[in-house]
């Protein structure tokens, strides 16, 4: 018998490049600061506002934010990667013939008091639900095998490793077929 997971009733709100509301950036930064409270002395984590600005400025940027009432509980965001810039290209992985587009899932995070309630799965599913790309790709810190296992349970598979920044962790590169 599988262990049951209590899924919270959460309001999922969708946002897109070019139509982000006032306070959107600050909302994501606040959730990140709570989700990574114990690791905010790390310079890489301190640069999160730069990542928000970088990703939200990309054409095709989409974000789903989970709310419990008016309290943000977590979010997931990403954007399509330009051909030739897909993260999996730095590995030995070769997609099936005919796979031409990749959506990068840059962040999936949930604040501590809302974890283990299925919210990350709801966010991830909502983020990818309407995508037209062939593949989804994401990076997982290799020191977090349980997170990697979670993504594998969602249909991803590890295809290699990379360290995109000198001060970033080493990441597992994980790919999911969106056409399956």
Image (cartoon, helix red, strand yellow):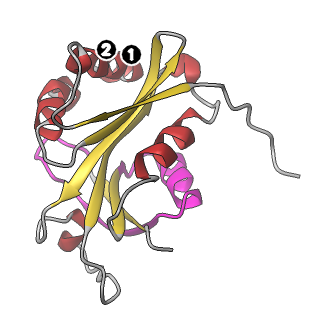
Is residue 47 left or right of 96 when viewed as pictured?
Answer: left
Q: Is residue 157 magenta?
A: yes
Residue under the point 29% across and 58% down: 103
Q: In the rendered structure, which segment of residues is drawn in magenta?
A: 140-169
Tell me which corner region of the image, top left, top right, bottom left or bottom right, holds residue 23. top left
For disc 2, the marked residue is 30
What residue is rendered at 35% in x and 68% in y? 135
Badge 2 element: helix
Q: What is the number of the mark on residue 42?
A: none
- The furthest residue to the front: 19
Is 51 rendered above or below residue 101? above
Q: Along the line of sight, which residue is nearer the eye, 166 or 52?
A: 52
* Residue located at (31% from left, 14% from top): 30
Q: Nearer the viewer, residue 141 or 137?
A: 137
Relative to 125, residue 131 above or below: below
Locate residue 28: give its quadrant.
top left
Residue 173 visible: no
Give percent across and percent down for residue 143: 41, 47
Quarter-of-image position of residue 51: top left
Q: Is residue 164 left or right of residue 110?
A: left
Q: Nearest the camera: 17 or 164? A: 17
Residue 60 visible? The answer is yes
Residue under circle 1?
34
Q: Are marks 2 and 1 in contact (CB under 8 Å)?
A: yes
Measured in 3D between alpha carbons, the distance from the residue under mark 2 to the one under mark 1, in whole angstroms, is 6 Å
Percent across and percent down for residue 146 are 54, 47
Crowding at dot 1, Cα within 10 Å, few <14 / some 14-19 / many 20+, comes out as some
Q: Nearer the viewer, residue 151 or 9?
A: 9
């Amino acid at each position: 018998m599988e262990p049951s997971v209590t899924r919270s009733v959460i309001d999922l709100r969708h946002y897109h490049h070019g139509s982000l509301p006032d306070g959107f950036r600050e909302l994501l930064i606040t959730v990140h600061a709570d989700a990574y409270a114990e690791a905010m002395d790390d310079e890489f984590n301190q640069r999160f506002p730069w990542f928000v600005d970088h990703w939200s400025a990309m054409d095709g940027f989409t974000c789903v934010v989970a709310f419990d009432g008016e309290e943000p509980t977590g979010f997931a965001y990403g954007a399509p990667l330009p051909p030739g810039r897909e993260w999996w290209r730095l590995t030995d992985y070769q997609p099936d013939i005919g796979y031409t587009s990749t959506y990068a899932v840059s962040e999936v995070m949930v604040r501590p008091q809302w974890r283990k309630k299925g919210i990350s799965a709801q966010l991830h599913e909502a983020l990818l639900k309407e995508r037209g790309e062939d593949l989804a790709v994401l990076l997982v810190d290799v020191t977090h095998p349980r997170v990697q296992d979670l993504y594998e349970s969602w249909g991803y598979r590890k295809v290699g490793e990379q360290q995109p920044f000198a001060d970033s962790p080493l990441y597992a590169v994980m790919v999911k077929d969106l056409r399956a």
